[in-house]
Image: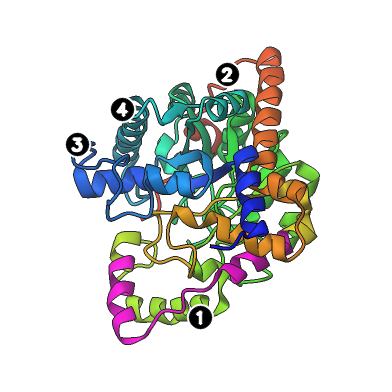
């Protein structure tokens, strides 16, 4: 094959600045497909019916991954906490099993050390405030186990925070919700605003004293989806010092896919399927796609979101959070985790410099991790842990159905 200087440039860039991706749901796939049995779910061998495995992570230039320790927001508090702990246990077991390939990581220094040793750094993020069961003690225990961020909601509201895909109930964050953010600041734990309603984003930015992240969200001005970030929040993200990690989910990055999804939601509700019930809704969409082809979107669509977030928030406030194995279909060319170089190539062709691409792949999120943890150390030296409860701050609230 003839020498391709752009491909060589992207390969050299990824060797120096490998991707630190904000969100991957492989642990949940391990639960569903093999009950966490790594003898049956060998991520090192490849060939799994997933979008992620170790060979494809290598091919995609991924040097660090926030593994989502996701559990459904439809679970009760007790069930959600227990299932989240099982997800954490799987990530730790996977990291131990493939110690030659994977390295546990909590800090930016850990990530850099993993890269220097030729291994992929494994971080964790809990996807939804239901995972702490309205308990700050549970939050602290997840942090102690290595969970580096908490997404404040998933598809449903918590008693203390409004979700982007549920009916607003508390006007953003309650007093307890603000205390969750403050305690995360003290722990040096990243506050993740993906999945939350715009009023929750704004309330969290009003409360936090550390940079926040969006682990897997794109730009609402480009694709009008409630899971995306409005421009006023992107401007505040610039002032906050945080990072928006662009995701690849087709309805979030392609307006045609979003329109298809809106039609599907109406049909699903007519059949009694709740779109917030991700497994049931995904199965419904798979059936619908047989008769109404789904417009997957393209690498260029994702690049449009990167361009927009760069323009509004600034180049220091953008990253990548593909949401692999958290969505059934992905844009053409980004079908699995090996596709990241195609996106970088598209951006390079649009004029992004190597310095810009290095900030996108990992530089910005590493800075945010360092700044949040440094701020946490300062806060921990000034005050002790919070003993506040939901009942004390908000009064008892029933969990949303």
Q: Is residue 237 visible?
A: no
Q: Nearer the viewer, residue 280 or 245?
A: 245
Question: Disc 2 designates what residue?
Answer: 385
The image quadrant that residue 137 belongs to is top left
Residue 39 marker: 3
Mark 4 lies on a secondary structure that is helix
Q: Nearer the viewer, residue 265 or 120?
A: 120
Is residue 361 shown above or below 248?
above
Measuring from the top left, give residue 63's x and y in whole percent: 53, 38
Distance from label 1 to label 2 (Cα)?
Answer: 46 Å
Is residue 77 shown above or below 163?
above
Q: Is residue 136 visible?
A: yes
Is residue 366 shown above or below 247?
above
Tell which circle, 1 or 2, labels the residue nearer the N-terminal end: 1
Measuring from the top left, give residue 313's x and y in whole percent: 77, 54
Which residue shows up at 39% across the image and 42% down it?
54
Is residue 137 shown above or below 22?
above
Measuring from the top left, give residue 65's x and y in whole percent: 49, 40
Mark 1 lies on a secondary structure that is helix
- Nearer to us of marks 3 and 2 is 3
Question: Disc 1 designates what residue?
Answer: 259
Q: Main secondary structure of the magenta part?
A: helix
Tell which circle, 3 or 2, labels the residue nearer the N-terminal end: 3
Q: Which residues are magenta?
A: 282-309
Q: Residues within 10 Å of mark 4 (few under 14, many from 20)?
A: some
Residue 97 marker: 4
């Amino acid at each position: 094959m003839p020498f391709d200087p752009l491909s060589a440039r992207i390969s050299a860039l990824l060797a120096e600045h490998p991707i630190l991706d904000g969100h991957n749901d492989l642990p949940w796939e391990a639960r569903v497909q093999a009950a966490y049995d790594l003898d049956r779910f060998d991520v090192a061998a490849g060939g799994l019916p997933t979008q992620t495995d170790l060979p494809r992570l290598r091919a995609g230039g991924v040097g660090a991954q926030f593994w989502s320790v996701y559990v459904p927001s439809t679970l009760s508090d007790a069930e959600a906490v227990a299932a989240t702990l099982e997800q954490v246990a799987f990530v730790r077991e996977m990291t131990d099993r493939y110690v030659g390939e994977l390295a546990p990581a909590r800090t930016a220094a850990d990530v850099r050390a993993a890269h220097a040793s030729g291994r992929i750094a494994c971080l964790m993020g809990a996807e939804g405030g239901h995972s702490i069961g309205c308990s700050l003690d549970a939050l602290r225990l997840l942090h102690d186990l290595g969970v580096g961020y908490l997404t404040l909601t998933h598809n449903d509201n918590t008693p203390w925070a409004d979700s982007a895909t549920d009916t607003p109930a508390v006007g953003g964050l309650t007093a307890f919700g603000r205390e969750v953010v403050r305690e995360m600041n003290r722990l040096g734990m990243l506050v993740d605003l993906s999945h939350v309603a715009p009023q929750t984003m704004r309330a969290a930015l009003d409360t936090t004293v550390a940079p926040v992240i969006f682990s897997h969200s794109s730009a609402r001005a480009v694709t009008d989806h409630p899971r995306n970030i409005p421009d006023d929040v992107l401007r505040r993200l610039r002032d906050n010092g945080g990072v928006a990690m662009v995701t690849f989910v087709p309805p979030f990055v392609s307006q045609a896919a979003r329109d298809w999804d809106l039609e599907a939601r109406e049909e699903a509700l007519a059949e009694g399927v709740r779109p917030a019930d991700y497994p049931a809704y995904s199965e419904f969409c798979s059936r619908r796609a047989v008769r109404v082809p789904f417009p997957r979107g393209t690498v260029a669509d994702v690049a449009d979101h990167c361009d927009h977030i760069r323009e509004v928030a600034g180049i220091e406030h953008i990253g990548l959070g593909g949401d692999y194995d958290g969505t059934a279909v992905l844009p053409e060319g980004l079908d699995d985790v090996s596709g990241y170089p195609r996106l970088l190539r598209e951006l390079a062709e649009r004029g992004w410099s190597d310095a810009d691409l290095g900030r996108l792949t990992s530089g910005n999120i590493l800075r945010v991790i360092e700044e949040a943890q440094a701020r946490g150390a300062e806060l921990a030296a000034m005050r002790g842990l919070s003993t506040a409860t939901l009942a004390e701050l908000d009064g008892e609230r029933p969990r949303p159905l």
